[in-house]
Image (tube, rainbow, N blue to C red):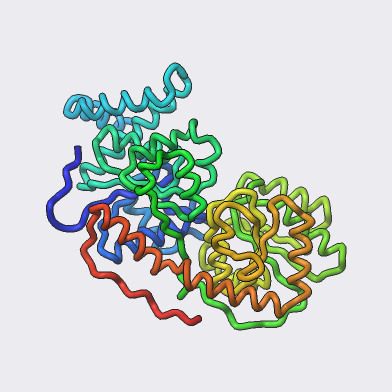
Amino acid sequence: MVTPSNSGPTRIAYLLSQYPAISHTFFLNEVLLMRERGFSIETASVNSIHPPAGGFPEDEMREAAQTFYIKETPKGRILKILLETLLRRPGVVGRGLSAALALRPWDLPGMAYSLFYLVEAILLGDWMLRKGCTHLHVHFGGSVATVGMLTSIAWEIPYSLTIHGPEEFYDVGSSFLEQKLRQASFVTCISDFCRSQLYKIAPVTSWGKFEVCRLGVRTAVFTPPPETARETLHIVSVGRLHPAKGQMILLGSIRELLDRGLQVRLSIVGDGDGRRSLEQCIETHGMKGAVTLHGALSHPATRALLGTADLFVLPSFAEGVPVALMEAMSMRVACISTFVAGIPELIEPGTQGLLVPPSSQTHLTEAMASLIADASHRKALAAAGRDKVLSSYDLYTNIGKLSKVFERHGIRGSSPEIPAPEVAS
């Protein structure tokens, strides 16, 4: 068991599936700003990192250098830690084994997976002990949280969760979400919708441990560029290349707009398993001159591309609350997305952007056509979108709220509240 010290800030371990990650900048922002507020945070990542073309920026490279990568632990080191833990702390192994085997009883392949997670949990707990970390915080509720839960049980370390959704909600049983929520000392949810899904599976007596802490963006960095007139309207979409992001529907809508004779071009930023099918669609329908797949770009390059956008479109089928949408809104780009999960909390349809039914190419095409034809409506939506992000999704403000949640649960920092930078409206 890790015993907290009686003085000074609590040493916190953040466990992430992959850190830093080009598609999850909010991890990096949260860690850095929580440290600015005096919280002592060490980072651990289950998986190795995959830098984008051109490498990570300096902040991320520095974080990578001091992050513990569990799966990179040499086999000899793993055996040494397991043996030492068994001999010196048999209770850790006993509690961990009991919890791991109870996850999938009588399912031999499932039990094998659980034992792999337990090995990672023992490695993580040993690392936390050496770092003096007395609290574990985990983002997402999937397999990374399984490792976190087993670490908490085996090493008797309190842990907390940030739940994003939606994957965790699809099969609550196989993700052991109910057990994870029960073990957690508190849970932050990125939206009211997210919290509602936890209310569905948790007893009313535990609802008090769920708090909404919204994500945010650096509104002082994602600022509107100077207005420029363009003959060809530029549409940008940012997200991993996966069917759930709806990019194939977007390509269909672009093809319809081109067939109507509208002057548009589309830039898609991101990479993933869906790239080949998108490339085939672009080639089959002769859209190479109008559509560019940029792959994964660095954060500055993505921000620069957003600065040239007239429209930002994210036609997702499944989301939490996309940070990519917040970034575009913060840069005063008119946005179109879907009525999915927490997105309507970010965009009030018709006020801060347009929302369409997911999977409906017809509705998406008409929404895009309406904003292409009406520049004043685009401008009004874009301005209201920027105002919404400033009021509800500013990163500095929301990190301040998150820090207060930590403090209410006895997790101490050491510095006074850091004022947010001045932001132009």
Quadrant containing the N terminus in the rendered view = top left
Q: How many marks?
A: 0
**Residue 151 found in image quarter:** top left
| 371 in relation to 63, above or below | below
- In this rendered view, identify the residue nearer to me: 31 or 176: 176
The quadrant in which residue 170 appears is top right
Q: Position of residue 99 (x, y in %)?
A: 33, 27
- Give whichever of 4, 380 is nearer the camera: 380
The residue at the point 24 percent across, 30 percent down is: 92
**Residue placed at 47% from the left, 72% from the top?**
391
Q: Is 330 situated left or right of 265 in this image?
A: left
Q: In this view, does 126 lie above or below 21?
A: above
Residue 318 on image: x %, y %? 60, 48
User: Observer-nearest residue: 211 or 30?
Assistant: 211
Residue 288 in view of the camera: no
Q: Is residue 35 left or right of residue 167?
A: left
